[in-house]
Amino acid sequence: MVIPEFVSSRSLTLGVELELQLVNPYDYDLSEATADLLRLLRKKNREWDVKPEITHGMFEMATGICENYDDIFSQLDEIRQAALLCADRLDIGICGGGTHPFQHWGERRIYETPRFDQLSALYGYLAKQFTVFGQHVHVGCPQADEALVLMHRLSRYVPHLIALSASSPFVQGSDTGFHSARLNSVFAFPLSGRAPMMRTWTEFSDYFEAMTATGIVKSMKDFYWDIRPKPEYGTVEVRVMDTPLTIAKAGAVAVFIQALARYLMTEAPFEEQERDYLVYSFNRFQACRFGLQGVYVDPSTNEHRQLSEELLETFANIESHAIDLRADAACARLKDEVLKGENDASWLRHQNAHMESLAALVQQQCRLWRD
């Protein structure tokens, strides 16, 4: 099988996808209302990108091509408001967060599509455990080789993005001790983690053809990498973020990636190399487990620093690019969270300490998404 042609797109344009939770208003467990919600949304005859996810109780909404934060926010907010109106008709709630705090995977049902049925048959119980919720950000690239370079350069910043967006401390009724427990579910899949080091589209095409020849891979969707090229869109897709609790946070994370990509493609102080990946899994784990307080090992110098220090230095490095992209205000809000040592995971833990139950916490998440 031949890899799809890489479609040229405008540099640094953005697309944002958010996977969201549907909950009932009684005990705030996940609700099997995905099909009904999508039916009502599609009756509005708008060209919104909304679709089911692998189990009932989930759905995804996505922007079109965006230039900046205002584009992202307005597109996501339009779908959010419409989805909330439809949810009110169905008497269900919608919220963000990387995991539902107490749903049990054994109670989930696979959403009926050929692909989801195939994944369920292949992965067994892992398919139902994949009831987790992430944010994906697409960054436009004019050329395929440039997309691969950007993919590898961004890989150094996977821990930064995990720590910024982490919002999944609770799983099946327990505090996991992680800031992003969601990524533990993703990492269970084969072909997850990092992409192999290839710098040219010719190399990547040869790799893709070899993998499809084995029968393991049928399309690019079978690569669950943290960052992957998306040739049919002409983008690099960053996939490590938990779904934030608000669309304002989702938009801020997206334009942080945009400014970071511009910095990396114009003045990066390093060249991508295989050595970068020696500490990749360690840095990734530290971000998932400890969030902003995690340890980051610099692949070039082997220096150990706290992720919050790394992030503050990154904000300084990308500041001029953020200003040019009109992303400076959104990045400043993220920087303020880092200075306070806060992310959505810490907010959830703080709220839960004052709540009578995890159901009350989900209710609060729904209020935050609505307001």
Image (cartoon, grey):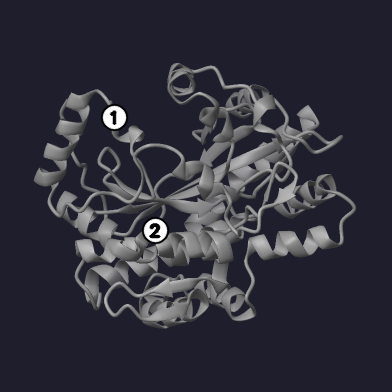
N-terminal of the two: label 1 or label 2? Answer: 1
The residue depicted at 26 percent of the width and 59 percent of the height is 152
The image position of residue 355, as x and y in percent, is: 87, 56
Tag of residue 69: none
Q: Is residue 68 visible?
A: no
Residue 107's quadrant in the figure? top right
The residue depicted at 59 percent of the width and 35 percent of the height is 131
- In the image, 218 versus 73, the foreground residue is 218
Q: Nearer the viewer, mark 1 or mark 2?
A: 2
Q: Is residue 308 visible?
A: yes
| Badge 2 density bin: few <14, some 14–19, many ≥20, Cα 10 Å | few
The residue depicted at 28 percent of the width and 70 percent of the height is 264
Label 1 sits on what residue type? Ser
- In the image, 288 versus 204, the foreground residue is 288
Does dot 1 land on a helix, a strand or a loop?
A: loop
**Vertical relation: 203 (above or below) 219:** below
Residue topped by disc 1: 219
**Left or right: 205 with respect to 370?**
left
The N terminus lies in quadrant: top left
**Left or right: 171 with respect to 306?**
right
**Vertical relation: 189 (above or below) 252:** above
The C terminus lies in quadrant: bottom right
Does dot 2 land on a helix, a strand or a loop?
A: helix
Using the numbered discs, state the Cα–Cα distance from disc 1 to disc 2 in whole angstroms: 25 Å
The image position of residue 237, as x and y in percent, is: 36, 49
- In the image, 268 versus 120, the foreground residue is 120
**Left or right: 175 with respect to 149?**
right
Mark 1 touches mark 2? (CB < 8 Å) = no
Residue topped by disc 2: 281
